[in-house]
Image (cartoon, rainbow, N blue to C red):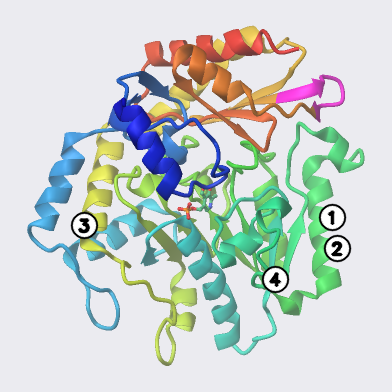
Amino acid sequence: MSDYERLRQLDSKHMIHTFLPLETRDRTIFVKGKGCNLWDVAGREYLDMTGGLWLAQIGHGRPEMAEAAAKQMSTLEYATAFWEFSNDKAIALAAKLATLSPTGLDVVYFTSGGSESNDAAIKTARLFHAHRGEPERTWILSRNDAYHGLAYGGGTATGFDGLKAGVGPGIGHVHHLTPPKPFQTWRYNGQSTTDFCIAELEATIARIGSKNIAAMIGEPVMGVGGMVIPPDDYWPRVAQVLRKNGILLILDEVVTAFGRIGSWFGADKYNVKPDILVTAKGISSGYIPLGAVLMTREIADAVCEGHGFPVGYTYSGHPVACAIALENLRILEEERLVERANVMGQYFSDGLQRIKDLPSVGEIRHAGLGIAIELVADKKTGQPLPDNVIPDVIKRESGVIVRMANENVLVMSPPLVITESEADRAIEAVSSVLERVR
Ligand code: PLP
């Protein structure tokens, strides 16, 4: 029996995979990664155009990261961040994040990933109002097609009904607004995307009552929703409405932070100042699970009042995770990878122009190295053309891994270290398959 078959059988028998029926036969079983490449157990090489799950900013298999982990593990492998206990690496990372993040977000709470961070952020928003004498502010505004993870807090804010079916009522008091998808003009009743979204936001606040709403949560650019890039005036205008009504803005930057969209944070790119900012993924380039919730001093003061912050995870401020994140940030800065995301994003955009007139290609868009090809059934109306088979065909034919987001948007989010020749290979692989789609 081949190694692949042996592992495949064990995998089918013992492992549950998100979004995969148990009886599915095929597996792609990776055993090694380097730069933008991955290798499976049979020795086949792949070009990882998804950067894992939108996170492998500095590329796979970097020895500096292994060294940072080994050094920290042999010095201090664990220390809690409950009560008065702390550790030097968590403190250094918190201070570093405060210098990189948008002004005013100086206080950090560490988690182990995006879902935990969103949970903590939603609790933080509700606690903030409760501690300031407005406990009735519990509603959370989100958007359809938003992805905020699949735990109960962020999971309730996630805007895909199919992901919530059968799991009960969630955290309650969550309302989903229309997302800003300028390309899908049919959504906005002839108004500009931003005008429509702002009018809907204001009407929703009036209906629920501003005094009942804690926060609005949103990704600066929606990743899972299909690389949804808002018009430039969307976030500043949303923030203005929220501020007027005493509603906090939580930016979920799990995908957008640390260079993915060509800026350190989406908040910088869209000129908006959140009250709470959620990160994970690119903070460690996926070398270790880590997330961080950044907030203003005013919010931290309010939620830590009395008995202190009532949110806590065993692995908060884990010294090994923080040491790895510090090394990751050092590499991002030293190799100027945030700037590189813009250069290479443009390179992709130029290279993909050859398929822009295909009948199935509605729009090619990118923010940094988040690249999207929106597939349409009708170029004039922009109605979606769902096709989940395309990534499989591309993987099988050329070993290039891409993903379909929201069923009709082919997305690529490669490591920020991608070279021009690797980009050429991906462009060729994707284009040659799309040229055959009718
Ligand atoms: N928020 C956003 C915007 C995400 O894209 C994701 C994951 O893809 C999450 C939250 C959830 O993060 P995690 O899977 O680390 O819990």
Q: Earlier in the sequence, mark 4 or mark 2?
A: 4
Determine the image quadrant of residue 208: bottom right
Q: CA distance from mark 4 to mark 2?
A: 24 Å
Q: Secondary structure at mark 3?
A: helix
* Residue type pointed to by label 4: Pro
Q: Which residue is mark 4?
A: 169
Instruction: Give the mark toward the camera: 4 or 1.
Output: 4
* Residue type pointed to by label 1: Ala
x, y percent for residue 398: 47, 13
Q: Which residue is mark 1?
A: 199
Q: Which residue is mark 2?
A: 203
Circles 1 and 2, Cβ within 8 Å, touching? The answer is yes
Instruction: Give the mark toward the camera: 3 or 4.
Output: 4
Q: Earlier in the sequence, mark 3 or mark 4?
A: 4
Q: Earlier in the sequence, mark 1 or mark 3?
A: 1
* Residue type pointed to by label 2: Ala
